[in-house]
Amino acid sequence: MSDISAMLVTTCPSLLSSSSIVPADNTSSTFPLLGAMCDPVHALKEVAMEHQFFIRQQNLKLYRSLVAASEAAAAKADARQQKHLKLLAKEVANEPPPRKN
């Protein structure tokens, strides 16, 4: 919570005079969408929305990674199956013809 408080003071200097929040450092906000908004509730909502966006991006990366891994596994299984089919075809082609009595 202190990070959020420091971030609010950094983006909303008027909060410093109206509350007991003291900024942790003088660095600029890591949340550029907050801009000069000084409503703490609105600022926290913005932070929450950015966090949700970040989580969605991470989930999308994970989903794409899983899809790629799944496709690679399927391609590997197909290649294995093709190899076995070729070996079986060779084996059948090399069998001697059946004897007629």
Image: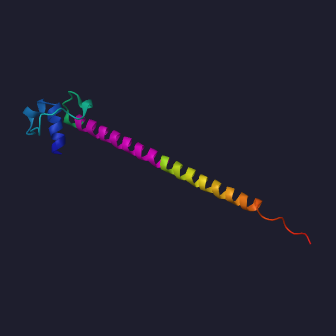
Comparing 49 with 73, the one in front is: 73
Q: Which of 20 and 92 is in front in this view?
A: 92
- Residue at 9% x, 37% y: name it: 19
Image coords of residue 36 (percent x, y): 20, 27
Q: Is residue 50 magenta?
A: yes
Residue at image position (17%, 36%) is: 8
Q: Where is residue 23 drawn, in percent x and y?
A: 11, 38
> Which residue is at 51% across, 51% downward?
70
Residue extending furthest top? 36
**Is 69 situated left or right of 52 in this image?**
right
Q: Residue 32, percent across and down?
A: 25, 30
Residue placed most toward the observer, 81 or 52:
81
Per the picture, the main secondary structure of the magenta-coloured stretch is helix
Is 47 covered by the magenta stretch? yes
Q: In this view, does 100 lie above or below 33?
A: below
**Residue drawn at (23%, 28%) of the image:** 35
- Relative image position of residue 43 (x, y in whole percent): 23, 35
In the figure, is residue 2 to the left or right of 32? Answer: left
Q: In this view, does 99 lie to the left or right of 32?
A: right
Residue furthest right in the image: 101
37 up-or-down from 20: above or below: above
In front of the other: 97 or 78: 97
Say which quadrant the N terminus sits in: top left
Above or below: residue 51 compared with residue 91? above
- Residue 33 occupies quadrant: top left
Image color mode = rainbow
State which region is magenta: 42-67
**Quadrant in the rendering for residue 93:** bottom right
Residue found farthest to the bottom: 101
Query: What quarter of the picture does the C terminus occupy?
Result: bottom right
